[in-house]
Image: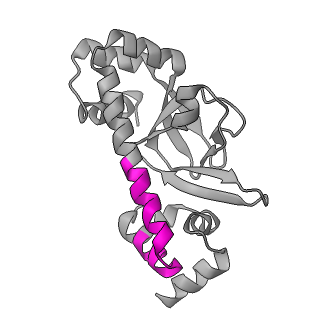
Amino acid sequence: MTIFATMDKLINYLLEFGQLNQQQIDLIKRKARVLALKKGDYFSEAGKIPKQVAFIEEGILRVCYYNSGGDEITKYFVDENNFAVDINSFNQKIPSSEYVQAVTDCTLLVFSTESLHDLSATIIQWDGIINKITEKALVEKVNKLSPMLAEDAKTRYLSFLEKFPNLANRIPLSYLASYLGITQSSLSRIRKSI
């Protein structure tokens, strides 16, 4: 895949949320840089202030943290054609409480804080586009997390398979079990029963 094809995915995604002329598109392409992550690499880490935002061209990232007992908890997954960042920490410039880790090998298009400020200052509709993307992401996050509170483990797993069929076979069972709030052995039993 060429860098231009990668950029085209990003531009097409942005155009879903607002109009951009060719000069603005060219500026966006110049401000992005490609970052390759290997499975297990971290895009951002807890305790550090996030300084970049990623558009996932290929691969899956997970957002996770460690609870007070030292257990690693997966909050959610982010797949292709989505942005990834701890938005609160990024916007407020405070240390994150979460890790963003590559579940698979990933190709990301990354924007630094400075690049995003330049785009905001130069492209009149940039902030509106970003606000719409952020709103969509927050709605999707709530839709991912809300059912988890009321459903039993089997229903949560079946719902995950229904909502994210392209993720199920690409995520290690340990991460999926953590996301579902169950042990890996419980997940194995559920998978055998269906």
Residue drawn at x 58%, y 52% is 103
Give the side of residue 74 with respect to residue 128, left or right: right
Dominant SS type (magenta): helix
Q: Quadrant of residue 25?
A: top left
Front in this rendered view, residue 125 or 172: 125
Residue 146 can be seen in this image: yes
Residue drawn at x 45%, y 44% is 58
Q: Quadrant of residue 8?
A: top left
Identify the image quadrant of the N terminus.
top left
State yes or no: residue 129 in magenta.
no
Give the side of residue 87 with respect to residue 99, left or right: left
Percent position of residue 89, x then y: 58, 33
Give the side of residue 11 with respect to residue 39, left or right: left
| Number of dots carrying numbers | 0
Q: Which residues are magenta?
A: 139-159
Percent position of residue 65, x then y: 67, 51
Q: From the viewer's perspective, is residue 46 above or below residue 123?
A: below
Front in this rendered view, residue 38 or 93: 93
Residue drawn at x 45%, y 15% is 117
Which color mode does the image show?
one colour
Residue drawn at x 45%, y 22% is 32
Q: Quadrant of residue 4?
A: top left
